[in-house]
Amino acid sequence: MSELREGVRRIGVPHRVVDGSPIASKRPSTDVWKGVLVTDIASLVNRSAELKRELLEFSEQPRFDRDRREVLREHFPNRLLDDEFELVTALDYFLLQHEPRSGMTVVERFVASRPDLPEHERELLLGWRDVVEGIFEVQSRDGDALVVENLIDELTYRVHSNMGPSVFQPLESGGFMICRIVPVGQEWLMSGNFTVHPKSDRALIHRIACKISMRYPKRVFRNPDKLARAQQLQRTEHDRFVRFFGADVVVIPGAQLTERMRSFYTFCREQVVAELAIFGKKPKHAPFHGFEYPAELVASDAVAVTHDEVDGASFYANFGMIEEAFADPSLLRHPDYRRRVRDYLDDPTVSPLLFVRMAARDPECTNQVFRKLLGRKHFDWAIDGEKLMRRRKPDYFDEPRLPCIVPLSDKLAPYAASA
């Protein structure tokens, strides 16, 4: 997946996946939540229905029309609002998660406009920003609640519906539902529509859950145990990358990229097999053979491959002129070189770590590059580098840095190769 404009590209690749063990856990339990007895969860669920209606009415004000249209365009690019489930999902996202230019979500504005609400109801509403989108396998019924396991994050949730427990009637044990849930007290509440799938759809559902896990790792890492495991696995892979290539950044001709990276992942596989053999174990799943890289990346004159303990592997196309400019800053007299370096600097999806790596190679040449590029005679990377990166690439510093390795459960790992 690539999100860079033409001229300079950091080519994304699918998130790495490994097989893992199922992890089940619940939200921490307590007897009191914001001054409300958790045993009175039914009143919270009933009140949530009233609050949701009031929130929806609040969102119908003309001042929200532009943002609503923007959300609907994103969910329905063909302009045909012909999918009721997707329409409800889009509107629920608009209410709880969409951040308009004002910087406040609709639910935040609603709460701000209602000073009459008790504190626990204000907290309840603001808690709805913590949406869990998942594919849930039904475990059991527990009174009015449904106990489910999210196949994405492998956490267990007790889910209620403000339409009453009868909506769970079509769900059989071992069946599945796809929906959005939000916190209600220490438990969870369905938000918007949901779809039901029988347990006979297990293979299809597991394949879809595997794809979602790889495409949206942030959802997987809601589970702190999976995040910790991914971080450890990525640190291990980083060590192997440095051992295999001799450094944490390597420049490879595009035509050789696929073979070189396949050799690296073969090396990683051999290391895993050797480590498991010490304990008399064998790998659970088929060998990982590497990715099919985008044609534009393979056709590149030179590809910079960096590997970081936190961010993992990153790939940068058409890197030849960048490397030449940082080795000989006088080349920036030529417009093509200046344009290429400036594109890398201005593109928010090019990680600051790439410039950190270049600066580590030759700090003085790096100073000369930015002095010439920015017209700042006294630029010093050691003093000014981080400030420059924060200004040009704010998203990198604003968003949490997540691993690019995604540990999958034994249920989902068999589908990784086809995801």
Image (cartoon, rainbow, N blue to C red):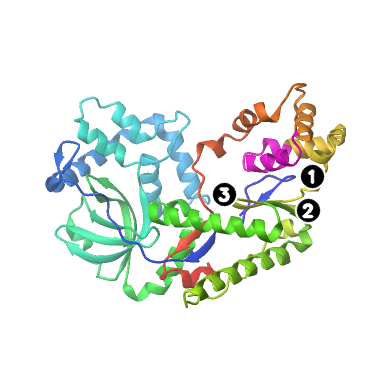
Asked if the residues shown at circle 1 and circle 2 are in contact, with their CB atoms under 8 angstroms apart, the answer is yes
Element assignment for label 1:
helix
**Residue found at x 17% / y 43%:** 44
Q: In the displayed image of the protein, which residue is found farthest to the top?
A: 377
* Mark 1, residue position: 323
Image coordinates for residue 259, horizontal then vertical, percent: 72, 67
Instruction: Give the quarter of the image for residue 417.
Output: bottom right
* Mark 3, residue position: 311
Q: As shown in the figure, which amino acid type bears the numbered disc 1?
A: Glu
Element assignment for label 3:
loop
Q: How far apart are labels 1 and 2 at the CA level? A: 9 Å
Q: Which span is picked out in magenta? A: 343-363
Q: How far apart are labels 3 and 1 at the CA level? A: 21 Å
Numbered disc in front, either 1 or 2: 1
Element assignment for label 2:
loop
Q: From what the image shows, is residue 324 above or below residue 21? A: above
